[in-house]
Every structure is written in structure tokens, then in C-alpha cells.
Amino acid sequence: MKNLIVNDFKRLFKSLVLWTVIVGGLALLMLLLFPAFEDIYADLEALLEGYPQGFLEAFGLGEDGLVLENIYGWFGVEGYLFVLLIGSVYAGLLGGSILSKEEDDQTIEFLLTRPITRSEIYLSKLLVIMVNLLILNAVVAAVLGVTFATLDTMNWMLWALFSGAPIILHMIFASTSLLISVFVTKSRTVMSIALGLVVGLYVVDIISSLSESAENLKYITPYEYVNAVTIVNDGRLEPLYLAISAAIIVVTLLLGWGFYRKKDITA
């Protein structure tokens, strides 16, 4: 199993570096724009007053929303979304392809002849996913920490929440995509489904903010579980959302493991 983990990690290393540079780079870019933005804050605030409250709330602004003159509020509106959305795309593609690619490329035939169980194959893929996501988020956390401390007063609680919350969201999409890949063995197809899931649920999150009649939709979109407004204004994540997130991750991983052990694999 160790060799399988090492081989997968080497195979995926270039894509990990690429996605880490993209996510970390965009987060850094948005933060570096903050000093220049401070000079025009009053003009932008006046401009935003002309927009409907529902529209502003969809992006974390409006009443009880984030304040852009604060670097943490600025990042919550301008940079945090990139970490969540683009990181989730990577997590979904990684989770959806790492297992299905073995059957799609017909390398599963070789694995099944080795002295390794299906549980070990599944676990090795899961470990590679977790390590890759932890590396990506650790780099982003380092970028945030250095930049927050350089541009403003360091708030360790907000830094920890901004660094840790995306991991929860990324694992939700990775575990869900991994479950889907147990049934959909064409890697391109499962990656398309994973991408659609990531983008589709973000659209649902926006809709739930735009209309009071659709407010209950927020419970089915994981983006709400790691909301920047709650992080900055309350300094925490909602316990209910944390419980739901943990349940989704555990259930999808266990279902994926159970079905993979029993599925009919055609080499």
C-alpha cells in the first residue's frame, strides 16, 4: 500500500503544485490590493448603497455583512471565495479521478493481481486526497498569515478560521466525488459531475441569499457552512454546520468504501 500511495502522490504532484499556486496566488493578490483600495473606500461604499440588499447579502455585504475597510472583511469578500471555490474544484476533480482513473486506464487489473485488498486501495486513495488537500491549504494558510501580519494587526482566531474552514468544504466535495467515482468509472464523466456539483451548489448558495423564499436552500449548500460573515463577525463557525459537514464527510467515505469492496470490477 505504501508504494501505491507514493506512486499516486508523485503522479499528482505537478497538478498539486499548479492548483496550490493558483489558489494561494489569487488569495495573495486580493490581499495585496487592500492598501490601494483603502483610499477609495468611501467612494465604493457610496456606490454599493445603490444596490439591492439581497444582492449585497449574496456577496457578504449589506446589513450585518462584512466591512470592506477592514482587511479581514476585505478578504472575506474578495479573496476567501477564490480559496473556497477554486480549491473545491481541485478537490472535486481529485476525488473524482483518483479512483475511477484506475478502471478507466485499465490499471486496476494490475492492482487486483497484487497482494493488496480493495480496502487498502480505497484507503490509499483517500490518504493521498487528504495529504494533497492539507498541503494546498497549509500553503494558503502560510500566505494568509504572512500577509495579514504584514498589512495589518494579526488576528490569530480569524486567521485560523480562514485557514481551517476551507479544508472542511474541500473534504466535502472530495469525499462526495470519491463516492460518485465508485459508480461512474469514466474519469472524464465523473470529473464533469464533480465540477457541476461544485459550481451548482455555489449557485444555490447565491440564490438562497437573494430571496427570502429560497432561504432554506442554504442548508443544502456546503458553502453556507463556512460562511465568511460568520467567521469575521462572530469569530466562529456554526456548530450545527460543523456537525452536518462532519456527517457528510464520514457518511460519503463509508458508503464509498462499502460499495467499492463489493462492486463488480471489470478489468
Image (spheres, rainbow, N blue to C red):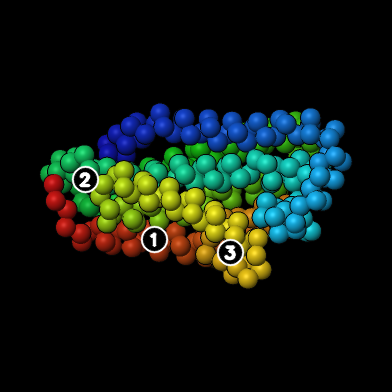
Q: Which quadrant of the rendered structure holds the N terminus?
A: top left
Pick whichever, 57 or 239, lies toward us.
57
Q: Amino acid at mark 3?
A: Lys
Residue at figure coordinates x 61%, y 45% from the top left: 81
Task: Using the image as rendered, state which of residue 74 and residue 165 is in the foreground.
Answer: 74
Secondary structure under tag 2 reads helix
The residue at the point 27 percent across, 36 percent down is 3
The image position of residue 163, as x and y in percent, is 61, 44
Considering only order in the chain, which callout, 1 or 3, is on the residue closer to the N terminus?
A: 3
- Residue 183 picture quarter: bottom left
* Residue identifier under label 2: 103
How far apart are the two marked residues, 3 and 2, measured between alpha carbons? Answer: 36 Å
- The answer to the question of whether label 1 and label 2 lie on touching residues, with beta carbons closer than 8 A, is no
Q: Residue 253 appears at what percent x and percent y? A: 37, 58
Looking at the image, residue 249 lies above or below residue 76: below
**Quarter of image, res 9:** top left
User: Sequence order check: which comes first, mark 1 or mark 2?
Assistant: 2
Q: For mark 3, what is the residue? A: 218
Question: At 39% from the left edge and 60% from the top edge, which residue is drawn?
Answer: 252
Seen in the image, is 261 located left or right of residue 141? left
Left/right of residue 210 with respect to residue 96 in the rendered view: right
Q: Residue furthest right?
A: 42
Which is closer to the viewer, label 3 or label 2?
3
The CA distance from mark 1 to mark 2 is: 20 Å
On the image, numbered disc 1 is attached to which residue?
252
Compare residues 156 and 87 and report the one nearer the observer. 87
The type of residue carrying mark 1 is: Thr
- Decide: is 30 above or below 223: above
Whether the residues at callouts 3 and 2 have beta carbons within 8 Å, the answer is: no
Residue 226 appears in the rendering? yes
Tags 3 and 1 in contact by the CB under 8 Å rule? no
170 on left or right of 33: left
